[in-house]
Amino acid sequence: MAVHVLGIRHHGPGSARNVKDFLEQLKPDIVLVEGPPEADDILQWSIHPELKPPVAILCYQPGNPQQSSFYPFAEFSPEWQAIRYARQHNIHVRFMDLPAAHQFALEEEKIKEAEKATGEDNSPTGRAAYYNNNRFLENDAVSTAEEETEAHMLHRDPITWLAKAAGFEEGEKWWEHMFEHRQNSESVFEAVAEAMQALRDALPPKEDRLEQAREAHMRKMIRQAEREMFQNIAVICGAWHVPALVNMPSVKEDTETLKGLPKVKVETTWVPWTYRKLSFFSGYGAGIQSPGWYEHLWKHPADDGTRWMTKVAGLFRKQQMDTSVAHVIEAVRLANALAALRNLSKAGLEELNEATQSILCNGEVIKMSLVGDELIVSNKMGTVPDDIPRPPLQLDIEKQQKKLRLPPTADWKDYTLDLRKETDLDRSIFLHRLRLLGIKWGEQTDVKSKGTFKEQWRLQWEPSFTIEIIEKGSWGNTTEEAASAFTIDQVQKAANLVAVCSLLQELIPAELEKSIDTCISQINNLAAASADVLELLQVIPGLVSVSRYGNVRKTDAGLITGILQSMITRVCVSLPSACVGVDEDAATLLVDMFRKMNDAVGILQQEEITREWQNTLTLIARNKNTVPLLAGYTTRLLSDYKLLDGEELIKLFAYSMSFAGQPAVAAAWLEGFLKGSGTILLIDEDLWSLVRNWVSELDEENFVQLLPLLRRTFAHYSSSERRKLGEKVKQGAGPVNRIAVAGIDEIRAKQGIDIILTLFGNKS
């Protein structure tokens, strides 16, 4: 009876190749792999032709799917090769790690302890907990209560100490050159075991209950295989665990360690994975820097750099970048020369990258980002068979994806949907329903198109969406059913009118009739009970935009219009009093609300509502107690409606700018009147003369004090408007005449002109 413990890196092509060669020579009768025992039953799928890596085993709590863990595999993962070998040769294969049922429960205990220590709520509910299971370098996925002591830092990256002793700056490159590039080396696993033993002897012991339990359970599984009379046992585990599995303590000690461990219910399945999620840039504890490069090493272990440089050249040519065969040859020569200078057996990724940047990119770093994204990391995505057991909601989503020709991809993919076409409309409805469920597969962007019949979406599938799908599966078995039930629950719990109206805006394009009816009823109730005119003013523009979907989406907008009429009437009654006695910040906020409300009334195009709104603006503009900023802005809106023009507008303008001894009040009124556009000053000479005369009559002290306010007024104008206003000043028909009236000398007059030009943004 023999036990062979093979220490590996969890995603290393050299380790995978050595494991495969070792197993083919050893021909074991059982293979034990580091992984969750709950997943033993789904290992039968590993040799299915449609299960193509990168894939991952997902372990999750049915009652709390956010409590989950992914175990990813690439083709070059040693565990994947070991599992495939065993299944292809009808050899027993089992996972031997501590069951996820215990690991999840221990993590929950750690979180509760942290809550007690800090007094904060660190509950995992509502967040995706990616437990990396201490892969290779023992990176803890949850360490909220653990301080970054020196000992902890040593344990987080112990390989770096071996790398530095060998003259390397970091452990990644050292491991790659020592193990991943090494071929046909029978003693590699002995060397790994010896190195890890030296590290564990040198480092201070790590007091970690989870790690101790994991290693105790691995030893338990090895002993169980021996009791079952397996004669040739192959054990595949992270390199760090090798000494703990070779030098076993007593059975009694391990039994005591595993005694009384908490436990929760766990289920498992296979899910697609991506190379980007396999990289440590995604936060994966056992991640690697370059999945795409490692796949290349797996497929072409003897490559001297020529094949890789050919890939780089092909990528550049697709991007219309001139790249010749001579470039490739020179880049390979340079990479190998760098490797020789650094006493390396062959050129690694660092040398190839330096040669690529020097020869193919002409030293430009930005071109290297393309190589990094497309080749070094890559966005390859795996697949899983359709008949693998899945939750009903996930099956429905996959069915809809196929029906609507929206395949999940790891890369961003853009879609412009024309809602007048049946298929595009169905796509839009599906994507909006997923967003309501919190599955943000699609990111909606603005469309440069008139009307509401087009939508622009960017789609990128993330493996973590599976967690959200499982979690939302409790609301229904189909996308429509789950989205409807979930949103109805949200509406019923909402007590805020703004929140409910925002939700209605999302519900309309998702075409969820029951949810829409519930939402409208809730809005009606909340609006009737609301005494806050500002809250009503805030939600009306959103509801108006919702009503615009009526024609395109065949939605009955009449229900919303009825609510809008009632709400607008209440706003018009209460708004004039709300514009009295407010501070500057509140007035500025109200101006923005007025603008949106005015646009909303224009969109509705209902004569009665428009007339009601215009009467309200008239009351606000003519009320002497209205805040000057709001009085000026409402006067401008009345002017835009052509309700104030000619002599009447000039008289009101002159009166409002003639606040004796209160230039700041006049300036605030002017800011409101000119809000958004200064074109009126360019085309109306009478108004321009009024502004000119008002500025002319200011004394120097008030003029200087008002400059910041005036500068703010003109800052938001377009560059062409500011330029034309500046030209008007230069021609002498502008406000700078006040300088001559005040009798200031020419030098100071020139300074005043410079200030005015700066005010308009025309100072050169």
Image (cartoon, grey):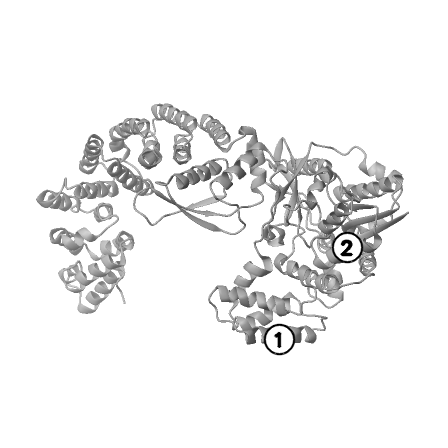
In the displayed orientation, state which residue is furthest to the left.
647
Residue 719 appears in the picture as rendered: yes
**As displayed, is residue 749 above or below residue 8?**
below
Q: How many marks?
A: 2
Secondary structure under the numbered disc 2 in the rendered image: helix
Label 2 Cα crowd, 10 Å radius (few <14 / some 14-19 / many 20+):
many
- What amino acid is at disc 1? Leu
Q: Which label number is shown at residue 413?
A: none
Q: Residue 161 versus residue 70: which sits nearer the camera?
A: 70
Residue 697 appears in the picture as rendered: no
Which residue carries the number 1 mark?
334
Q: Residue 380 versus residue 290: which sits nearer the camera?
A: 380
Q: Which residue lies at the image location 70% right of the left edge and 57% below the top edge?
A: 12
**As displayed, is residue 560 above or below residue 184?**
above
Residue 540 lies, in percent from the top left, at 32, 34
108 displayed left or right of 361: right
Cα separation between marks 1 and 2: 33 Å
**As displayed, is residue 634 above or below residue 667?**
above
Does label 1 or label 2 sit earlier along the sequence?
A: 2
Label 1 Cα crowd, 10 Å radius (few <14 / some 14-19 / many 20+):
many
- What amino acid is at disc 2? Val
Q: Which residue lies at the image location 72% right of the left edge and 37% below the top edge?
A: 41
Which residue carries the number 2 mark?
19
513 displayed left or right of 568: right
Q: Residue 736 versus residue 491: which sits nearer the camera?
A: 491
